[in-house]
Image: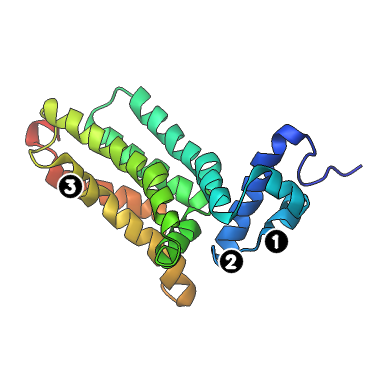
Amino acid sequence: MKQPKFQRRAEDRPREICAAALEVFAEKGFAAAKLDDIARRAGVSKGTLYLYFTDKEELFRAVVKNTIAPNIDAVRDAIMAADLPFAQLAPMFLARMSEMATRTPLGRVVKMVIGESGNFPELAKVWHDQIAVKAFAIMTGLIERAQQRGEVRPGNPRYHAFSLMGPMLMGLLYREVLQPAGGEPLDLQLLARQHAETALAGLLLEKAS
């Protein structure tokens, strides 16, 4: 007998609803996503959905917390567990983030947040608090530690982090917005490798190169 897409155990339902909501948000955007569509995708009634989430905004918060943020946490844990010089950690971080962006609908959700946060400010707040702050904290912390070790040149660690991570965000948005409109395909993982090599040439002190 074929198993249903989502198991029926009650304790699994919030996770299943979040997984379905992520798919619908990525496909349709926030404004166009209907709770009816999400409930249908999750294989539950709309009434069941309301047992767990009061509205679409609360559901989006849960989606980010339960389906996207854990990926950032996994990257952080892997990076922090590696006792390596910054010259190796920075490319590792960018590579893992680009792999996550390739494997998940991260880019479509980022596009949605940017495009719709004017009408739905809560989207930007949730993304800032649960994703952006975490991601920049990882890189900023690595840079601060590398500066203390004499590996990275002086400068505001947070701004150095923006310099390292900014082109990856640009690449992500290019792939989601311009590539479908006819732009030449962009390989995010290749971009991560080349950008890390180029940026590190300017960030690393000679003795750490």
For marks 1 and 2 on the same chain, the one whose residue lies earlier in the sequence: 2
Counting residues from the start of the chain, the first of labels 2 and 3 encountered is: 2
Asked whether, in this view, residue 36 is left or right of residue 189, the answer is right
Q: Nearer the viewer, residue 180 or 87?
A: 180
Q: Are marks 1 and 3 in contact (CB under 8 Å)?
A: no
Relative vertical location of residue 148 with respect to residue 195 in this rendering, above or below: above
Asked if labels 2 and 1 touch by Cβ distance under 8 angstroms, the answer is: yes
Label 1: how many Cα within 10 Å (few below 14, some 14–19, many 20+): some
The residue singled out by tag 1 in the image is: 37
Q: Which residue is identified by label 2?
A: 28
Q: Position of residue 140 (x, y in %)?
A: 24, 38
Q: What secondary structure is found at the residue carrying circle 2?
A: helix
Q: Amino acid at mark 3?
A: Tyr
Q: Is residue 71 visible?
A: yes
Badge number at residue 159: 3
From mark 1 to mark 2, how far is it between C-alphas? Answer: 10 Å
Q: Answer with left or right where residue 70 lies relative to residue 16.
A: left
Q: How many marks?
A: 3
